[in-house]
Amino acid sequence: MDYDYALFRAINNLAGHWPWLDGLMRLLVNEYFVPTTMALMLVIMWFWGKDEKERTHYHRTVILAALSLITANIVLKGINLLYFRPRPFDAHQVNLLFYKPWDSSFPSNPATTGFSIAVAVALQDPIWGIPFLILAVLFGFSRIFCGVHYPSDVLAGALLGTFTAWLYARYSYKLDEPIAFIRRWLKKLCLA
Amino acid sequence: MPPILNFVTPALALKYFSLCFLAVTGALQIAAGRRGIEGLSLLPASFRFWQVLLGLALIAGSFAIFFAITPEVFTPGLAGSELIFLFGCGGIASLLFTLAIAEVRGGSHFPPLPPDAEEELTDGKIALFGGRLGEGVDFCLIPDPWEPFSLDSLARLLADSGRKVAVLHWTSLPDYGAALGFPALALEKYKARTIVGHRAGGNIALRLALGSGVKAIAIAPFTKAEEAEPGLNWLEESGIFTAWKRLRGRKKLIEELLPLQKAPNSVIIPPEGEIKPWRILQDEVILRSVVDKILKEGTGDERLPQS
């Protein structure tokens, strides 16, 4: 049995029953709401520290999240060039609540984006990581709910995002000097 | 391979840019309100609750308007790279807008008050409150050279309580020599018994007291070199342009004046509770309590003014 498709069906069949849930998922599924909200949270985080120690911590977290996002998306583009997987609506009858994207279904771009930021933040600061992770999970779930991704696409995207975030956390000490350099320049502008 | 920036429709790009501009402005207000960052505040820093509320309203409102006027959200739209580019542009535009408005709104917290008499000395002017030229004074007040009129209100209150006060008005940013030379000249000329300094002026007062035997009262002086480092802490204190002006020489002067040393009969008035050092003279009630302390410490006079 195709567990991936079975799980997709179970989630996608929830669509169309409760207007409020459909509305919520349509808010979450698009490319604007979750990424912009995460970016806004990073902006707030940048200015959140009350002393030098806290600021160093938050600035480091924001920079690592940005690097993780960029790296994950570069790897994702590479995978997209090598492998194309049709979308669920190309092969099956689905409850489609979103437009029909034309790019590869695997791995999920939104899940990669969401988890690359959320895990990067969570690994540096678990408390701040909670809302980021909730948004990332909801972003991925909404893509299945609305019929544009298989669960395996979202899982692969989440793993890719998590892996790049983990890499940056694991080897972040090698970035100490570049991060300090960025902060030194922003300090001169009174912005760090 | 598709180009990195397509801008699928200019109208959609413009709408998303506007969303980012407004939402980042809101995010900055939340951070500024939470942390009391003067240089990022569209409202006075004391309106912290309203600032956070304004920030939340801006974010919620901008999202609501964006989704209401953008049916293209549910059609193929901007690519990820375009979103990042537009968020960056909107964010930078918002930051510049917020910094500029905060600078204009903030202005100087310490407008000059008209003194009763004024005299020109080398390196600056002396404003006399409650006295006339040629007289000795009870107090010599040394403001922070980067906040030249910060002690005028204090001087007026001291004068109203019957004291004679000389306030140094720096006409240019001093180096270490001038920072000590000008007040020393004023002390000699006006024979003050007590010197009172604010922020960097406090450090100058403490340093002068070490060698001269006069009593020094330092209001919220710099205690660590990091406080004089440029960075976000300066934006907490003032607008961005004022902060940049302070890049000229403040850190060097503070480093030369530190470590903080206290002559035996000198007094430091630190900020209390959650009051930031640079706000200690901005509140009427705190200002009056500082006057009370100065009168008690500076003259030994228990006869405090009726305030």
Image (cartoon, rainbow, N blue to C red):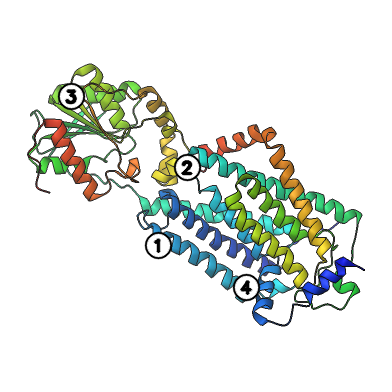
At 58% from the left and 55% from the top, the residue drawn is A41
Give residue B67's mark.
Answer: 4
> Between disc 3 and disc 1, whose residue precedes?
1
> Between disc 3 and disc 2, whose residue precedes?
3
The chain letter for the residue carrying disc 3 is: B
Q: Is residue B192 above or below residue B235?
A: above
Q: Secondary structure at mark 2?
A: helix
Q: Are marks 3 and 1 on the same chain?
A: yes
Give residue B232's mark.
Answer: 2
Q: CA distance from mark 2 to mark 1?
A: 22 Å
Frontmost of labels 2 and 1 is 1
At 92% from the left and 68% from the top, the residue drawn is A1
Mark 2 is on which residue type?
Leu
Q: CA distance from mark 3 to mark 1?
A: 46 Å
Q: CA distance from mark 4 to mark 1?
A: 25 Å
Q: Which residue is mark 3?
A: B187
Frontmost of labels 4 and 3 is 4
Q: Secondary structure at mark 3?
A: helix
The chain letter for the residue carrying disc 1 is: B
Mark 3 is on which residue type?
Leu
The chain letter for the residue carrying disc 2 is: B
> Between disc 2 and disc 4, whose residue precedes?
4
- Asked if the residue at tag 1 contacts the one at tag 3, i.e. Cβ–Cβ closer than 8 Å, the answer is no
Q: Which residue is mark 1?
A: B50
Q: Are marks 2 and 4 on the same chain?
A: yes
> Between disc 4 and disc 3, whose residue precedes?
4
Frontmost of labels 3 and 2 is 2
